[in-house]
Structures are given as C-alpha cells and as structure tokens.
C-alpha cells in the first residue's frame, strides 16, 4: 500500500470511529494519516476539532491554523478557528479570521453570519448591518439571521423593518420566541403598546424564563396605563433576575406615577450615591494630573479608555478600583426596598471596570450589564472656570428623585447604582466626561 493510500485509509477509519463516538481511537487514526502525509489538512482539521472538544485550546488553535495554511480556500476551517477565538475571549482576532474567510468567499453564509453577529456584539453596528444584508441576500429565510438582524434594526431605530422581518420569521416558525420579542420591541418603539404587550406575552408563553422580556412587557403595560399589571411584570422580572437594571429603574418611575407604597424614593435611595476626590499620584501636582487626564480623554481615538494608554488613565484605574471595592464592602448585605422580593441589588462575585468618554448631552446610555455606574470630571482642559459639569438624578418632570443639580468639582468621582436615572448638563464647550461602568461577571477572580 502506498503512502497516499495508507493516508486515505487511516483518515477514513478515523472518520468512521469519530462518527461512532470513539474519539480517542479516531484521533489516533488522524495522527497515523498525518504520519503518512503531514500536510493532510483534513486530518489536521479533524484533530483540531477533537482537541477543541476536549478543551485543549492551544493544541486546537495550532492544528486549525495548520489546516488553514495547507487547505488554501477550504471555507469551513476559518469559521471553526474564528469560533474558537471568539469563545476564548479574542473577538478582534475572530473578526479578522471571519473577515478573511468572507474575503476569500463572499458567498460563505456561515462566515458572514458569524462575522456580523460578532461585530454586533462588540458594537460595530454599521459593519454588522452591512454583513447581515449580504447574508440575507443568500438566505432570506434563515431564522437565526432574521432574529439577529431584527434585533440590530431595533437597536438602530429602524422599527418598521424590524417588525417586517420579525413577522416573516414568525410566519416561518410561529413558536420562535425571540422573533415575538423583536416584534414587541418594534411595536413598542412605534407606540403600539397594546400590540407590543401581546407580542411579549406570546414570547413568554413560549419561553417563560426571560427577565428582559418581563421588563419590556412592564414598560409597555405602563405606557398603556395598565399600572397594576406593569408592576406585576416588573416584579416577575426581578424575581427571576434580582438587580435587573431596567426593571429597577422602570419600577421607580412607575411607583412615582401611581404614588403607592413603597414610594419611588425606596428604590432611588440617595444614600447609595458616593462621592470621592481623585488625587494626583505622588510627585505630580493636582492641576497637572487633571489636565493630563482631561487631555487623554479628549484626545482618545477610541471611546473606550481601557486598556490604559498613559500614566494618567492608569492612575485613575488604580484609584477607581480602590473606591469601587470600598463601595461594595460598605453597601448593605441585603437591600430590600420591596420586601416581598428579597435582595434586589446583590453585589457581584466578580466585576470588571469599563471606562469611556461620553457625550454630555441628554441622558447617558446605561451599559446593559452594568451593576454600578459613575462619572469622573477631570475639569476643563484649559482650566476655565466658565466650564463645568452638573448632574441631576431623576428625570426633570418626574417624581423619581431629586431634580437639584449637583455641580461636579474638577477631580470629583461620583458612584451610584446603575438603575438610577440621571441627566448631565455642561457649561461651556469641550467639557470632558469619563463614564464608569462596573460590570458584573459570573466567574469569581482566580486565586
């Protein structure tokens, strides 16, 4: 038997054993195939997939990269590598792999879908929408694609098209809960709250454990004037996910509207607001430090300030980590503004810090996964006293808390629960604001 036929025989035996679930024996056959032909990209790919399945990420990545290098234009290999990179927390690398696969084959549906989904996840909405559009031209009935693009269109404010695509998905699969959710979001955006309520209820009938959908249902019920049912929906959300930011915020607004006990102030508790002063590192004057921090934030090409690119931001991160840890340690062990629901704002077991510059106009957006929020005001770049930043908790015109404006001082840190509604107001031009998000993680820190 020639080397070529031995190689093919070993690969075929490996595939048969893999299909039979005898993975260790299959891997041995693939290694035998590679001993006959080291550039056998099929055996390299299958070994890489087996290594990934076994949790041997380093070996899997190496094998998949080798398979890609020998395979030329085999389209499935980059998709497998991209998925591995995404699952191991390397989204930018994954995007580059998916992008290369699409460049090699613009009709590769799986690569387009993975690329667009990951771009949507990291917030590159324009690029994501463009790739979704290309994918939908290839398969306009793909359910996962219809759900994903409708969700993105809702986020981008195109509720009319989101509703059309969601309705199409429901026609194809009437019991598809995410499509009913997307339809509800689109209808709510169009102020069709009665129809939105029915869509959210249908989604929850199909898939009951959806805290986010209960929160959306509550908001639509409140907008339709059904306050008792809205409160019930928010409570259902909070029972399933204590600390749900949108539900807590909306519940405070609802309690203010219906003027019932407990009052809105039970949730918007201003004792939970913390202020601190950001002091300069040793050997640096306060004025120079704040000037450098303001310049770093203003000159940042990326909205995100992490990872820290200079000493001023790195020092800010160190100080914030200390203050956040103190804030968490000092908070009540159990916070029960609505006693029947138990602890509504449990402290995270682990967290990560996100910092970014933010627009000072209107209501700053809340990070969906944020547990604690905050602001840092470094002060104006030019030191002018005519520049300033003020914060008010509670929307003006709503009885959800104080509408008094708090004028922040240069170097001030403000921390508060992420469910607090607030507005900011800038005096003068080019006022720099740094937004803090403390994002809960499910995994405790190692060690």
Image (cartoon, rainbow, N blue to C red):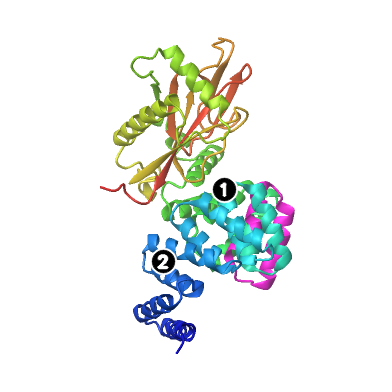
Find out whether residue 213 is within the magenta segment: no
**Helix, strand or loop at mark 2:** helix
**Helix, strand or loop at mark 1:** helix
| Residue 424 in the image, given as x and y percentages of width and height | 57, 26
Find out whether residue 176 is within the magenta segment: yes
Q: Identify the residue at horizontal 50%, vertical 39% (top origin).
A: 252
Q: Identify the residue at horizontal 38%, vertical 18% (top origin).
A: 279
Q: Image quarter for residue 397? A: top right
Q: Image quarter for residue 199? A: bottom right
The residue beneath circle 2 is 52
3D distance between C-alphas at marks 1 and 2? 50 Å
| Residue 345 in the image, given as x and y percentages of width and height | 39, 43
Which labelled disc corresponds to residue 227?
A: 1
In this rendering, would 423 be left or right of 186?
Answer: left
Q: Quadrant of the N terminus?
A: bottom left
User: Compared to 63, does 368 lie above or below?
Assistant: above
| Residue 85 in the image, given as x and y percentages of width and height | 47, 57
Q: Choose the circle earlier in sequence order: 1 or 2.
A: 2
In the image, farthest residue toward the front: 2
User: Compared to 323, does 159 lie above or below?
Assistant: below
**Region in magenta:** 149-178
């Amino acid at each position: 038997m020639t080397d070529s036929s031995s190689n093919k025989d070993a690969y075929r035996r490996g595939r048969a054993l893999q299909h039979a679930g005898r993975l260790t024996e299959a891997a041995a056959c693939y290694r035998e195939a590679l001993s006959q032909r080291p550039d056998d990209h099929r055996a390299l790919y299958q070994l890489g997939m087996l290594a990934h399945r076994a949790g041997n990420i380093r070996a899997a990545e190496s094998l998949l990269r080798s398979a890609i290098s020998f395979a030329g234009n085999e389209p499935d290999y980059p998709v497998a590598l991209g998925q591995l990179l995404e699952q191991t927390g390397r989204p930018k690398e994954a995007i580059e792999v998916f992008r290369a696969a699409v460049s090699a084959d613009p009709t590769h549906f799986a690569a387009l879908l993975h690329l667009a989904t990951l771009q949507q996840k990291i917030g590159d909405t324009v690029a994501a929408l463009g790739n979704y559009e290309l994918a939908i031209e290839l398969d306009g009935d793909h359910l996962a694609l219809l759900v994903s693009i409708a969700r993105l269109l809702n986020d981008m404010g195109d509720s009319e098209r989101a509703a059309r695509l969601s309705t199409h998905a429901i026609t194809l699969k009437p019991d598809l809960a995410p499509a009913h959710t997307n339809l509800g979001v689109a209808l709510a955006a169009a102020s069709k709250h009665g129809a939105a309520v029915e869509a959210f209820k249908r989604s929850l009938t199909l898939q009951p454990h959806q805290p986010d959908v209960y929160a959306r249902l509550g908001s639509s019920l409140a907008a339709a004037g059904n306050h008792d049912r809205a409160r019930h929906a928010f409570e259902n959300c909070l029972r399933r996910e204590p600390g749900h930011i949108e539900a807590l915020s909306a519940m405070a607004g609802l309690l203010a509207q219906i003027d019932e006990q407990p009052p809105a102030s039970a949730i918007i508790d201003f004792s939970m607001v913390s202020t601190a002063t950001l002091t300069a590192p040793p050997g640096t004057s306060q004025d120079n430090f704040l000037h450098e921090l303001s310049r770093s934030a203003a000159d940042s090409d990326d909205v995100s300030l992490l990872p820290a690119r200079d000493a001023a931001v790195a020092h800010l991160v160190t100080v914030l980590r200390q203050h956040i840890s103190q804030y968490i340690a000092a908070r009540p062990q159990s916070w029960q503004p609505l006693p029947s629901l138990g602890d509504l704002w449990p402290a995270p077991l682990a967290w990560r810090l996100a910092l970014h510059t933010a627009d000072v106009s209107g209501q700053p957006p809340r990070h969906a996964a944020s547990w604690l929020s905050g602001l840092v005001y470094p002060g104006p770049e030019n030191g002018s006293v005519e520049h300033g930043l003020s914060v008010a908790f509670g929307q003006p015109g709503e009885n959800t808390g104080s509408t008094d404006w708090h004028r922040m001082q240069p170097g001030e840190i403000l921390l508060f629960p992420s469910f607090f509604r607030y507005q900011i107001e800038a005096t003068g031009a080019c006022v720099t604001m740094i937004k803090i998000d403390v994002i809960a993680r499910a995994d405790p820190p190692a060690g």
